[in-house]
Image (cartoon, rainbow, N blue to C red):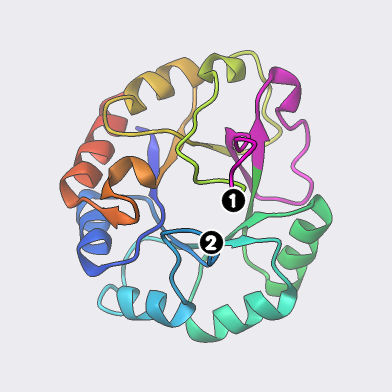
Amino acid sequence: MARVKICGLNDPPGVEAAISAGADWIGFVFFPPSPRFVTPARARELTAPHPGGPPRVGLFVNPTESAIAEALADVHLDILQLYGTPETVAAMRARFGRPVWRAAGVAAATDLPTAMDGADALLIEAKPPPNATRPGGNAVSFDWTLTQNWTPPGPWVLAGGLDPTNVGAAIRQSGARSVDVSSGVERAKGVKDPDLIRDFVRNAWAA
């Protein structure tokens, strides 16, 4: 079965739906321009009722060491998901001793990473549109068949433009064993829909 990450959680119903549906990871966005932004303190409040829940992933964009240190002082995170240079990824992994996922934008086969560059996993998604204010989470997909002949340098997660109706096709066409969804399980921008979360997990597993 494909493994599933539900990202951008920001309210109790969403967190509870992700956990009860069997998500393998739950994600929180610590990037203010995102409509899914939460503070570390809010993430702590949301996860406190679920001490035995799935691993928690914190998403950061070009973070400083102090920003991550401050977040970790407020909330326990099992994994750091970073938008940044390979040097940043390696430095944060060494500094905080947690697994790091590095995001990589793809528009053509030549964009697919050939090295982990210090990351424990790669998050593969479409490059952001020209007018985007965020490096990821733009509900944009790329040609999933691009990864069919790719030899990944390590574990990877497919993201971008996924929803309950297309996740099965995405898994079959890309060969992904793990998928990440955020806006595709929302009923309005930044508002998670528990039913869509459950449908997404079920359809990903069925693929």
Image quadrant containing the C terminus: top left
Left or right of 107 on screen, residue 71: left
Spot occupied by residue 138 in the image (x, y as percentages of width and height)? 50, 42
| Residue under the point 70% across and 19% down | 109
Mark 1 and 2 residues: CB-CB less than 8 Å, in contact? yes
Instruction: Classify mark 1: helix, strand or loop.
Output: loop
Disc on res. 133: 1
Label 1 and label 2: CA atoms lie apart by 7 Å
Spot occupied by residue 127 in the image (x, y as percentages of width and height)? 63, 34
Q: Earlier in the sequence, mark 1 or mark 2?
A: 2
Q: Nearer the viewer, residue 132 or 59?
A: 132
Left or right of 21 on screen, residue 53: right
| Residue under the point 65% across and 24% down | 107
| Residue under the point 79% across and 46% down | 117
Disc on res. 33: 2
Residue farthest right in this picture? 87
- Callout 1 amino acid: Thr
- Callout 2 amino acid: Pro
Left or right of 180 on screen, residue 188: left
Looking at the rendering, the stretch of residues picked out in magenta corresponds to 104-133
Spot occupied by residue 118 in the image (x, y as percentages of width and height)? 77, 51
Tell me where residue 12 sits by quadrant: bottom left
Mark 2 surroundings within 10 Å by alpha-carbon count, few (fewer than 14), some (14 through 19), many (20 or more): few
Disc on res. 103: none
Q: Is residue 51 above or below residue 70?
A: above
Residue 124 on the magenta span: yes
